[in-house]
Amino acid sequence: MAKTLVAYFSASGVTKKAAEKLASAAKTDTYEIKPAVPYTKADLNWMDKKSRSSVEMGNKSFRPEIVKDDLDLSQYDTILVGFPKMEYSL
């Protein structure tokens, strides 16, 4: 039987809620991709051009360091990844 993982990065909690709903409906595992330094409300103030999220959006070479752990991806056949729209331009 195929095994699926829903992995997500959520700065404000919106993506987390969507990932958890999807995982619950599909009966899959979830995994939160966490920044080494958690975001504050000030970091997420997209109206401030000097806020952390604005700098990350404006400079593709600047991305948050993520917490590294012992997740074994080899046990999954399918990995669905969710992330905030602020991290990717459509």
Image: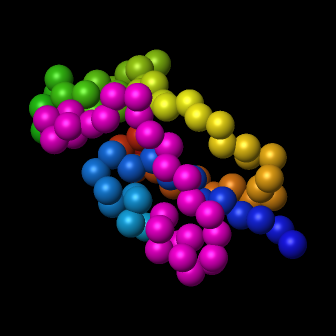
Left or right: 25 in relation to 57 = right
The residue depicted at 47 percent of the width and 74 percent of the height is: 21
Residue 59 in which image quadrant: top left
Rendering coords of residue 18 (x, y %): 43, 67
Name the one closer to the observer, 64 or 24. 24
Q: Is residue 36 magenta?
A: yes
Residue 57 quadrant: top left
| Closer-to-camera residue (25/50) | 25
Which percent across, then down, holds residue 15?
Answer: 40, 58
Query: Does the stretch in magenta take in 42?
Result: yes
In the rendering, at what x and y percent does residue 42 appear? 14, 35
Q: Which residues are magenta?
A: 19-45
- Seen in the image, is 60 located left or right of residue 70? left
> Residue furthest toward the right?
1
Left or right, residue 41 beside residue 72: left
Quadrant, the N terminus: bottom right
The number of discs equals 0
| Residue at 66% in and 42% down | 71
